[in-house]
Every structure is written in C-alpha cells, then in structure tokens.
C-alpha cells in the first residue's frame, strides 16, 4: 500500500519533471535553430557583399551620412575609434559583421543592402 502510493507520487513527479524538461528542450532547440538561421542569413549576406564591386564615391557619401557622427568627418575618430588602416586590422568579414550586427554598443547595427555595404567597404579600404 505504502509502496504503491509512494510510486504514484514518484510517477507524477516524473511526469511533471519530464514535461518541464521537454519544454526546456524545445525552447533551447528553437533558440539554437534561430541562432543558426541568423548565422546563415548573415553568411549569405557577406558572400553577396564580397561578390560585388563597390564604388568608393558612393561609399564615401554613405560614410558621411551614417558614420561621421561617431568616427569623425575624416574617420580619425571621435566617440568611435580611428578607422584608418582598419582594413589591415580587421578582415572584410569582420568589418561587415561590425556594421550589420551591432555587437559593440554604442555603435548601432545598420540595415544596409549588400551593394551599399560593398561601397562602404571599398571606401574603408582607401583609408590607409
Ligand atoms: C553611435 C556611434 C557610432 C556610429 C554611428 C558608428 N560607429 Fe562604428 N564604432 C563606434 C564605437 C563606439 C566603436 C568601438 C566599439 C568597440 O569598443 O569595440 C566602433 C567601432 C567600429 C569599427 C571597428 C573598429 C575597430 O578598431 O575595431 C568599425 C569598422 C566601425 N565602427 C565602422 C563604422 C561604420 C562603417 C559606420 C557607419 C556605417 C559606423 N561605424 C557608425 C561608434 C559608432
């Protein structure tokens, strides 16, 4: 009698425990797949950007519109760091991620299409 009631308690405990584990597992799976989906999206974006041949002139004006507030009109740095020789310190992949991912606040993430990203990158390559 005692055994059966304690196993009933154990049973319901196990059921509850399993339910919670399944929920936690499902949530983790969703997070992991969202993460990979985002990574994949970013990788496609980067590949597309690197295939294009950007325009320095367009990149220059994009920089003047979006970046000078923090990096300075001559990109010598203000709130944000000096971006001269940035292309020697960071590779194109890292620069693109820096611009689109917003991983280092206060620098925001920019929603910029691959053509404009390519223009911007081309411009940054001229800052030696
Ligand atoms: C609101 C201010 C702000 C704006 C606008 C901004 N940045 Fe930044 N940026 C920063 C700050 C601050 C950092 C330094 C982050 C850190 O500490 O790692 C940074 C870092 C960077 C870096 C990496 C520098 C390094 O030495 O690692 C690059 C490249 C960069 N910014 C490019 C850009 C470009 C291109 C734009 C325009 C599309 C832009 N930023 C707009 C504030 C800004």
Image (tube, rainbow, N blue to C red):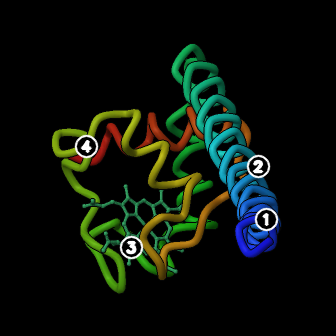
Queried on whether the Cβ of the residue with tag 3 lies below 8 angstroms from ligand 1, the answer reads yes
Determine the CA span between mark 2 and mark 1. Answer: 32 Å
| Identity of the residue drawn at 52% across and 50% down | 60
Left or right, 74 with reference to 51: left
Closer to the chain start, of discs 1 and 4, is 1
Q: Is mark 4 within 8 Å of ligand 1?
A: yes
Q: Earlier in the sequence, mark 3 or mark 4?
A: 3
The earlier-in-sequence mark between 4 and 2 is 2
Say which of 64 and 46 sits in front.
46
For discs 1 and 4, the disc positioned in front in the rendered view: 1
Distance (Cα) linking label 1 and label 4: 66 Å
Place of residue 35 in the rendered image (x, y in percent of width and height, measured from the top left): 63, 45
Please, what secondary structure does the residue beneath circle 3 have?
A: helix
Front position among marks 1 and 3: 1
| Marks 2 and 1, the one that precedes in the sequence | 1
Q: Residue at x 57, y 14 (%)?
A: 51
Q: Residue at x 60, y 63 (%)?
A: 109
Q: Which residue is mark 1?
A: 4
- Quadrant of res 76: bottom left
Image mark for residue 71: 3
Q: Quadrant of residue 42?
A: top right
Residue highlighted by disc 2? 26
Mark 1 near ligand 1 (CB under 8 Å)?
no
**Comparing marks 3 and 2, which lies closer to the viewer?**
2
């Amino acid at each position: 009698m005692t055994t059966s009631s304690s196993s009933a308690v154990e049973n319901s405990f196990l059921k509850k425990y399993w339910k919670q584990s399944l929920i936690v597992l499902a949530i983790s799976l969703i997070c992991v797949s969202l993460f990979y989906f985002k990574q994949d999206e970013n990788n496609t974006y980067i590949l597309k950007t690197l295939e294009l041949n950007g325009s320095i002139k367009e990149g220059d004006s994009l920089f003047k519109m979006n970046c000078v507030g923090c990096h300075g009109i001559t990109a010598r740095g203000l709130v944000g760091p000096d971006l001269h020789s940035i292309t020697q310190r960071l590779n194109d992949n890292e620069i693109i991620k820096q611009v689109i991912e917003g991983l280092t606040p206060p620098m925001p993430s920019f929603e910029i299409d691959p053509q404009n990203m390519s223009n911007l990158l081309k411009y940054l390559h001229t800052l030696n």
